[in-house]
Image: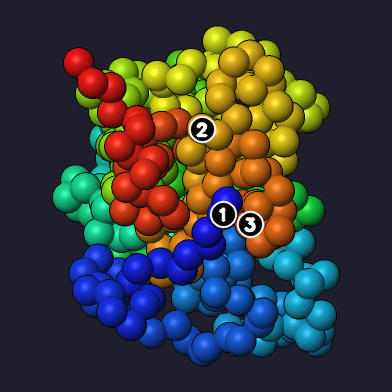
Amino acid sequence: MALVARPRSLSASSSSHHFRKPVPLNPRPICSLHINSSSSPFTEKHSVERYQRDQWLYKNQFGRTSLCSIPPDFNSTRENDIALQLPELKKLLQVLREKRESKGGNCGPGNVFLVGTGPGDPELLTLKAVRVIQSADLLLYDRLVSNDVLDLVGPDARLLYVGKTAGYHSRTQEEIHELLLNFAEAGATVVRLKGGDPLVFGRGGEEMDFLQQQGIEVNVIPGITAASGIAAELGIPLTHRGIANSVRFLTGHSRKGGTDPLFVAENAADPDTTLVVYMGLSTLPSLAQKLMHHGLPSNTPAVAVERGTTPQQRKVFAELKDLANEIASVELVSPTLIIIGKVVALSPSWPHPLKEASCLVEVK
Ligand code: SAH
């Protein structure tokens, strides 16, 4: 069984309470672009708009720089646009260094904040995150930081996209480390924005480690991880007395790029544990098979949620044995989070809530 649902906030009867767009603090972009931006709330597809907003300079075919001339062959240029920012970045670094020297050069390094931005809905940001975002000189952000969150950035700050997307050349992790370090050493307040929580499958630990080894202090501001944000959105308690006594976050992604990193399946196949799988779309068919092989009932309730907590959210409910096929049939794409466990049937959107939920609760 499966159900594909649009977000509540988009349905006519919805009491849309948390998709309200915040009042943007920035001036309007210099020009509006209509380049196949689809409806993604995330930044990957909008990065050119972001560069425009920041007045990153583009060279047109006559070699002149222009604020608004996006070259005609946008796709081929897109691969280069980060490289095009380098002169601007260097200039910015130079300005910061000069400013610092003019003050006698004896002030310490700037601050680096690793900030979690939650799964997409800007109202899930912490107050601390909003304060730091608004005071930043430079912000480096990933693919899963939503545009609504970036609208909170102060008008004088610089935004730099450093996300990694298949087929899209961007910064390597080492380059990101160097950028953070150079700007912090020049005295800037540098904010590294990461979707969800920076310390949950976010490589925040690596960046923190690198900077601390270079003597830079790193402040971490937690974010609502996709599991919490999406479970709340769907009305799924990740733990529930008598139904799930633990919750486990796992990644479906293989570090070496293989498709079968699922050695955890044996331990994870516990009917009393809720499993939340990050980055699990491609390996789900294999994971589901293994979980069932190791004893997880094939009718365990499950859900896959694409672009959770955003107005474009889509979700597919199914029993574990059917989930991979149902996901394929509606072509969910990344970012998608998968929740597997009896608690999923407690969601008001579970297709057979009453029947399933009454079977689930243990009679003590
Ligand atoms: N640090 C992030 C996780 C980054 S890993 C966090 O704490 O949430 C990226 C994976 O997170 C995605 O592949 C997807 O599985 C999940 N994810 C993050 N945001 C999501 C969203 N809005 N909707 C669905 N899945 C999301």
Residue that extends furthest to the top in the rendered view of this protein = 267
Picture coordinates of residue 189, whole percent (x, y): 32, 45
Quadrant of the snapshot with the C terminus: top left
Q: In front here: 8 or 73?
A: 8
- At x 40%, y 19%, the residue is 272
Q: Secondary structure at mark 1?
A: strand
In terms of image quadrants, where is residue 245?
top left
Label 2, secondary structure: give it.
Answer: loop
Answer with the quarter of the image where residue 70 lies: bottom right
Residue 241 versus residue 179 in the image, above or below: above
Q: Amino acid at mark 1?
A: Ala
Mark 2 touching mark 3, by CB under 8 A? Answer: no
Which color scheme does this rendered protein use? Answer: rainbow
Q: Which residue is mark 2?
A: 300
Of circles 3 and 1, the one toward us is 1
**Residue of label 3:** 332
Q: Nearer the viewer, residue 122 or 219?
A: 122
Residue 182 visible in rendering: no
248 vs 112, left or right, is right
Residue 112, given in percent of the width and then of the height, sits at: 35, 37
Cα–Cα gap, marks 3 and 1 = 13 Å
Q: CA distance from mark 2 to mark 3?
A: 20 Å
In the image, residue 114 sits, relative to residue 156, either above or below, namely above
Q: CA distance from mark 2 to mark 1?
A: 13 Å
Q: For the point 64% across and 23% down, which residue is it? A: 292
Say whether disc 3 or disc 1 marks the residue closer to the N-terminus.
1
Q: Point out which mark residue 2 bears.
A: 1
Residue drawn at the location 72% of the way across and 36% of the way down: 285
